[in-house]
Image (cartoon, grey):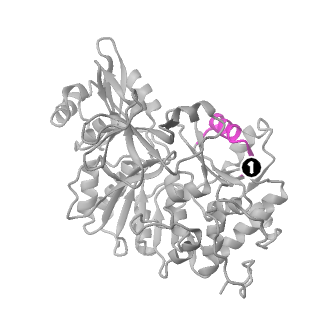
Amino acid sequence: MTEAGSGADSSVEPPVPSTFNLADIWEATAPRVPDRIAVVCGDVRRSYAELDDRATRLAHWMIDQGVQPGQHVGLYLTNCPEYFEAMLGCYKARAVPINVNYRYVAGELRHLFSDADLVGVLVQPEFAGRLSEIASELPKLQWSLELGEPYEAALAGSSDARDFGPRSSDDHYVIYTGGTTGLPKGVVWTHENAFFACIGGGDPSRQTGGVSDPSELVDKIMDVPIVFLPVAPLMHAAGQWTSLSWLFCGGTVVLLPGSLDPVRVWRTIGEEKVNLITVVGDPVVRPLVDAWVAEGPFDISSLFSIGSGGAPLSPALREQLMDLLPGVIVSDGFGSSETGAQGAQRLSEVDHSGESTRFTPYTLTTVIDEETRRPVEPGSGAIGRVALTGRIPIGYYNAPEKTAETFVEIDGQRWVLTGDMATIEEDGTVRLFGRGSGCINTGGEKVFPEEVEAVLKAHPSVYDALVVGIDDQRWGQAVAAVVQPVPGTRPSLDELAAHCRASLAGYKVPRSLVLVDGVERSPAGKADYRWAQQVAAGG
């Protein structure tokens, strides 16, 4: 029975979705589990009925401000229950929520707000001052709503009626990506394609199979909820996609406010009886492992799976994690904002010696030769760009040239060409080498930074590392390492070079080294190669 104040009549049968619109899917789920906890964040707990009611009220408030279907609304927020209310409220109103990186400074914010054509923004109080710095330069920005008293007053004064008009599977979902190697850009999806490619298509674990018709989604609502903890910001695709996938089937999402606190992560797993967590590669796993070694063990009796994506998980650190947590399955995935989740490698204590660069594709993935624009022959060893067809984005927002470069037609079929370089093995698995945009050309040989970084991180004195190419008169480019040492150590170039030579060809071994106090990464764990390039060149 739906809770009082939910805006729904308990005598009315909950709707069965007829579209793959994300609001329609949510509105079919919430009334079926109204009293179940949807979101936990600190001391705040929101039931499905409460979350739906608040999202409905916010949708009406935005419509009253003049927000039209298809217009963009910024979410300048850290992890909090209001993030979900804002996303769902936008979907209900047929508006498009836009993720805003809360680490951006004024210039970066100005670009994103202008590029995305934001008409409004929801903002946390601590960011209001930064927003005010640029507001006068954003003529399309019509309103801002600050969390706290203004936000609660807006909800209290708005309608709780779920009286919205029909929606479409072709409504837009947009995720902004980038900013470490270039200006951020918005990837535009339809709701339907995003639901299948990014959000699991009714199968968050991607193991039991999704749905073929929207009406089947009501059968995917779990009798007993999975408790899920995304150790990633909701402003990042990994946080959004995984959280929505569990909410749409009746799960409970546990959010951690503020910056990463690894001890708090472990304790929250025990306190909230978390079943699944997602992490963002080495930048999150390394401090989690350190905290376990220093202050563990912790109660993780409820935990049965850890998923990683969004940044590389090095083999050495993966092995250490699995040795510490025997019985916990580790799933290492790959994909991007332009492809959704493309593939994964699931490992347990009985088979965790597999190569970390090999992934099983979820769907129509191949590798395209950049010169011939033809798929490479499986097992040939030829390297090309990872490509995906089928459910892919419409393109980039406000960027026709970038769209034409990335979304191409081959033999009458539309493909997205990613920045990942790979080859296809005989059995159809994808072996990743790294991002083509960061590929180093040294004396005519290609070096993929991620491959060298993984080897460096296996050295006991290396806490974190980035590898870039710097100008070299003889070789054109030389391999340079920017390393954050383990506290109390100071590895030398000779020491690290000798370590690398045991696993890598000589031309891949770093020829220069800069030691730093900390490696710069985005809040989502993405490597900041622009910063590393400056450090390596200056060092």
Question: Which residue is rendered at x = 19% and y = 30% of the image?
Answer: 505
Identify which residue, 469 or 393, lies in the foreground.
393
* Magenta-span inclusion, residue 116: yes
If the image is split into quadrants, where does the N terminus sit?
Answer: bottom right
* Magenta-span inclusion, residue 37: no
Residue with the mark numbered 1:
71
User: In the rendered image of this protein, does residue 84 appear above or below residue 299?
Assistant: above
Q: Which element type, helix, strand or loop, lies under badge 1?
A: loop
Horizontal and vertical percent position of residue 92: 71, 63
Question: Which residue is rendered at x = 40% and y = 47% of the image?
Answer: 365
Left or right of 34? Residue 512 is: left
Question: Which residue is rendered at x = 41% and y = 71% of the image?
Answer: 275
Identify which residue, 370 or 491, lies in the foreground.
370
Horizontal and vertical percent position of residue 355: 24, 49
Looking at the image, the residue that sits furthest to the top is 473
Q: Is residue 294 visible?
A: yes
Identify which residue, 484 or 27, lies in the foreground.
27
Horizontal and vertical percent position of residue 349: 22, 64
Q: Residue type at mark 1: give it.
A: Gln
Magenta stretch bounds: 104-121
